[in-house]
Image (cartoon, rainbow, N blue to C red):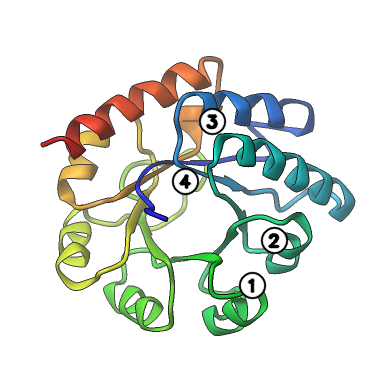
Amino acid sequence: MTLAGIYAITDSVLTPGELLLEAAAQALAGGVSVLQYRDKQSPPRQRLAQARALQTLCAVHQVPLLINDDVQLCLESGASGVHLGQSDLSIDRARALLGDQAIIGVTCHADLELARRAAQAGASYVAFGRFFPSRTKPAAPPAPLQILTEARRQLSIPIAAIGGIDAYNAGQVLRAGADLLAVINYLFAGPGTESRARQLNTIYRGHAAQ
């Protein structure tokens, strides 16, 4: 499976329970390539029900569903994989639990050494950011776009960029070396999720065709 394109990440504040599936459906209809379920607040039973519903929806669109942080929820929901932070379960342990085919992504902030270690440990992709002011994580330390260029030279796995990405800056992120544009706020903070996903996809396809 090629990991490239628009990587939509849900948010329990922007897409609360009753809005989650509709927002995700719009993102998928707009052509996102990956969907991540990110909810650190809801009760476990609700998270499992939502993850299973999202997995069913993603299967229809043949798009992988990733679970933020929670390997057990990934197993129980049948999702395609997980995204791990630096303080979460190790890649080796996650791989042992989820299997060789699982997608495992790792947050690397602005640290190429973390990315190299993740690649060596068997990560499916690495994620850098934030690159622009982010409403979701306003206190996250900034990352320079140049790190994407350096990572492209040094790594052979896909590279995701996150943090304040929208239709106005997506092109420069892609030109710097990103394979995946991870987007939360621009897609889910208001109406028009499908059209915004299509807009980002148009930018991505234009870049890929060059």
Tell me which residue sits at (53%, 28%) in the image. 27
Q: Nearer the viewer, residue 65 or 90?
A: 65
Q: Which residue is mark 3?
A: 28
Query: In the rendered structure, are the residues bearing label 2 and label 4 in contact, judged by CB atoms less than 8 Å apart?
Result: no
Q: Amino acid at mark 1?
A: Leu
Element at label 3:
helix
Q: Which residue is mark 2?
A: 74
Q: Amino acid at mark 4?
A: Pro
Q: In the figure, 147 relative to 178: above or below?
A: below
Tell me which residue sits at (23%, 44%) in the image. 173
Percent from the top left, x then y, of residue 7?
45, 43
> How far is disc 3 from disc 2 in space, using C-alphas?
19 Å
Element at label 4:
loop
> How far is disc 4 from disc 1 in space, using C-alphas?
32 Å
Tell me which residue sits at (36%, 76%) in the image. 119
Q: Amino acid at mark 3?
A: Leu
Element at label 1:
helix
- Decide if residue 169 is in sight here: no
Tell me which residue sits at (67%, 31%) in the image. 15
Disc on the earlier residue, 1 or 2: 2
Instruction: Give me the disc on residue 98.
Output: 1
Query: In the rendered structure, are the residues bearing label 3 and label 2 in contact, judged by CB atoms less than 8 Å apart?
Result: no
Disc on the earlier residue, 3 or 4: 3
Q: Which residue is mark 4?
A: 138
Disc on the earlier residue, 3 or 2: 3
Q: The N terminus appears in which quarter of the rendering? A: bottom left
